[in-house]
Image (cartoon, coloured by chain):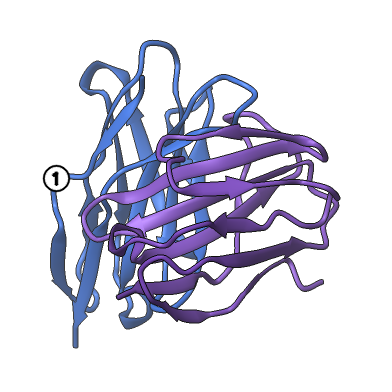
Chain colours: A purple, B blue
Amino acid sequence: NAGVTQTPKFQVLKTGQSMTLQCAQDMNHEYMSWYRQDPGMGLRLIHYSVGAGITDQGEVPNGYNVSRSTTEDFPLRLLSAAPSQTSVYFCASSYRAGGREKLFFGSGTQLSVL
Amino acid sequence: AQSVTQPDIHITVSEGASLELRCNYSYGATPYLFWYVQSPGQGLQLLLKYFSGDTLVQGIKGFEAEFKRSQSSFNLRKPSVHWSDAAEYFCAVGANNAGNMLTFGGGTRLMVKP
């Protein structure tokens, strides 16, 4: 089992560029989510999905789009990158949605926006 | 809305010494509480969780945590720290809703002296 796979591991963008961070899980998990990690602020939820075709906003959704066309994939799109989006991004999944569920994390994408 | 505070940003302990990492939460109902660990360059891994019942919970790698409702705390402990425990530790509280919206603390970075 690969678990949760994120690509790329590192990315440098210029302000205004767009890109998609990929996330795939092979555990047939119902729930998938994106977090960003900034020093001293822990992880903050960007968007999440409780199943294919269903997405919703988290704590810090501005500047990001998501879609969930399959159970396995949950890409995060930056339409026009800004320096404030420089961060480490983590995708996480769990078997079901709900506050009791253990999250499985990918290894992260380090994004720098110049 | 729930919140989590980890008062100590950095902690240094000697190998073999005991460890306690502090976590205070704010949540209106009975919380779902978690401790995750992040090794350098890696995603987060679940150490332990508390939902209900016995307030002292055991986790992996010899860690334990105690839920104290009166103090709104969920401190993580280990009797004897190993060099491999050097990492960043995150406390999180899960809301009792379908969104699985974990709220993380800012993290505590643990350094272990030989």
Chain at tag 1: B
Q: Amino acid at mark 1?
A: Pro
Along the line of sight, the residue nearer the viewer: B69 or A50: A50
Left or right: where does residue A108 sit relative to residue A101? left
Quarter-wise, where is residue B75 in the image?
Answer: top left
Q: Residue at x 14, y 52 (%)?
A: B8
Classify B58 as above or below B74: below
Q: Which residue is situated farthest in the front direction here? A: A16
Classify B77 as above or below A61: below
Quarter-wise, where is residue B23 in the image?
Answer: top left
Q: How far from the left and from the top, in percent, is residue A56?
A: 61, 32
Q: Residue at x 30, y 44 (%)?
A: B105
Element under disc 1? loop
Mark 1 = which residue? B7
Q: How far from the left and from the top, in percent, is residue A77?
A: 58, 57
Q: How far from the left and from the top, in percent, is residue B34?
A: 45, 41
